[in-house]
Image (cartoon, grey):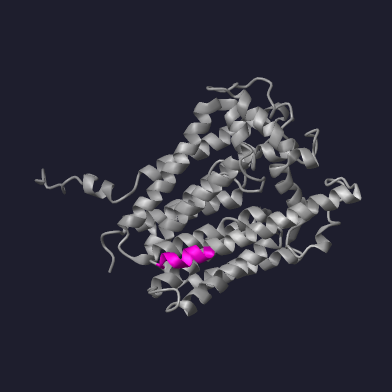
Amino acid sequence: MKEQDGLPPRRHLSLGAIRRWDLLAPLCMLFLTLMGIFAIHSAQSAFHGTQWRGQVVWFLGGIALYVLCAAMDYRIFLRQAHWLYGAGILLLLALWTPLGVSHCGAQRWIRLFCLQLQPAELAKLTTIFLLSATLSRTRIDGAIESKFLLLRLFVIFSIPWLLIFLQPDLGSALILPPILLALLYVSGLPGRFFLLLAAFAFAVLALLAWDIFRYRNFLDESSLCPDRHGGLYQSHSLFPLKDYQRNRILGFVAPAAVDPQGTNISWNLRQSLIAVGSGGFSGRGSGDDQTRLGYLPRSVATNDFLFSTLAEGKGFLGAFSAVTMLMVLSWNNLRIARLSRDRFGRYLAVSAAILLAMHTLINVGMTLGLMPITGVPLPFLSYGGSFLIVCFLLQGIVQSVYHRRQNLD
């Protein structure tokens, strides 16, 4: 460009500079988060709830962290993975200190100053860092040849998984195994290993089915009500589940056996199905509905069952749009994984894709009665600051992987 009147040439943002950044992910994230804020506001409008304001604050903080992580070189997390993993474990252990906050028999939150955080969500992120870092430093040749590496990975995975399971938080515990399996698959582990894992998983499910069968017989023989006499069976079983978790599984496979009237254990699910079905194609708008009238409990309408609130208010169009955006975001992360020039970046992007996909699958599945009810939030949509921040952090790191895909040292 020629200089005019002694002034330096104007600088324009070139098309090549724009292409160095992925624009699809931030657009999807913005769409989903705004949709979630409006759905939270709608769910609480009847009693003037203010959770949507808190979600806006977390949203703004998430944007700042997203920009920061996107501008950083993601390989810094490779060098600091052990320290970050240790910090995540310490946060989980803090649940059993005076910092821990108990709610409905679960020890899942800690209070730091004026904030209430859920360490399990942060531990997912730090575990992903160390799993990805460990795999990126050593190439897997086979299950036998890499047995010590697999043992290290199992230890890294097991410590946070066990601490999360003991809270108890079965929903979050279900997210980590698919991430580890996906990383092992991408690393090139032979198919025979996954066949052995499938056989092991089948055996565990068989034991679980037998335990649930014995639990149902225990209730029948003792003439006990499952929602009023919880905890009596778990001391007789070797399977590490709480009775309320067994009730949720029974409410899924045999609701008539534990709640024939649909007024106790299966209440949330029944109201969720009514809410989703009544939304129709385009939604009911702002009239009287399951959420505003309180049939779908206010304690779950903005977090675990936000998909039901969204489907009732915006109908099939709104629900389909949200799920489509989440699937596009997961697919985009896999696309970035293929474009990555190093294994650490590839593993981070794959982990982000699996985390989003599993949260979406489990959350939508439980609200539609296709899976047992577990406390798994919907990414970018459900109320809650810890998981929203983790989603923005992870997507910012994936953006950094995409931005640096061509100029790695």
Whole-percent x and y of residue 196? Answer: 51, 66
Taking the image as shown, residue 268 lies to the left or right of residue 346, namely right
Q: Quadrant of residue 243?
A: bottom right
Whole-percent x and y of residue 44? Answer: 68, 32
Whole-percent x and y of residue 377? Answer: 60, 46
Residue 332 sits above or below residue 86 on the image: above
Taking the image as shown, residue 118 lies to the left or right of residue 224, namely left
Taking the image as shown, residue 266 lies to the left or right of residue 8, namely right
Which one is nearer the viewer's eye here, 14 or 402? 402
Question: Which residue sits furthest left?
Answer: 2
Which image quarter holds the C terminus? bottom left
| The magenta stretch spans residue 298 | no
| The magenta stretch spans residue 193 | yes
Q: Give the residue at x 83% y 57%.
A: 233
Q: Quadrant of residue 99?
A: bottom right
Whole-percent x and y of residue 175? Answer: 57, 56
User: Taking the image as drawn, is residue 29 in sight?
Assistant: no
User: Taking the image as drawn, is residue 315 in sight?
Assistant: yes
Instruction: Write the start and end of the magenta stretch as one range.
Output: 189-197
Which one is nearer the viewer's eye here, 24 or 268? 268
Magenta residues: mostly which secondary structure? helix
